[in-house]
Image (cartoon, grey):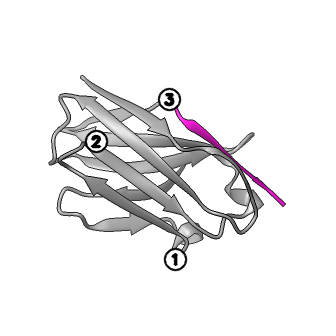
Amino acid sequence: QVRLVESGGGLVQAGGSLRLSCAASGSISSSSAMGWYRQAPGKQREFVARIMSDLSTNYADFVKGRFFIARDNAKNTVDLQMNGLKPEDTAVYYCIAVQIGLVYWGQGTQVTVSS
């Protein structure tokens, strides 16, 4: 079993920055893929970014150049640095881990960007 706990959300003005962190515990492996999704009110959950075990990364087009994902396998953490935040980035951000075909989700952390 894998447990994911997010932190770092909050309220920020447009143009500001936030850093989200996800701490994984339990039987997490460095071979897992980890990433972030988000869900805005009234919308479906959508992919934001992911980082593979070889540290390769992928980003949704709407965050490219603004958000950056990184992981520390020694600490079992994955961070999402969010810069140039926009009101449309307001959402609950969820950490995800995929390991041996199983998908694990965190409880989410709220990010609110005011205009």
Magenta span of residues: 108-115
Percent x, y of residue 17: 61, 62
Residue 114 is covered by the magenta coloring: yes
The residue shown at (49%, 53%) is: 47
- Residue at mark 2: 98
Amino acid at the residue labelled 2: Val
Q: Is residue 60 left or right of residue 25?
A: right
Residue closer to the observer: 18 or 101: 18
Percent x, y of residue 12: 72, 54
Amino acid at the residue labelled 1: Gly
Local crowd size for mark 1, using a 10 Å CA cut-off: few (<14), some (14–19), many (≥20): few
Local crowd size for mark 2, using a 10 Å CA cut-off: few (<14), some (14–19), many (≥20): some
The residue shown at (37%, 57%) is: 50
Residue closer to the observer: 80 or 64: 80
Q: Measured along the vertical axis of the image, is residue 39 above or below residue 79?
A: above
Q: Earlier in the sequence, mark 1 or mark 2?
A: 1
- Residue at mark 3: 107
The residue shown at (25%, 57%) is: 52
Quadrant containing the N terminus is top left
The residue shown at (23%, 44%) is: 75
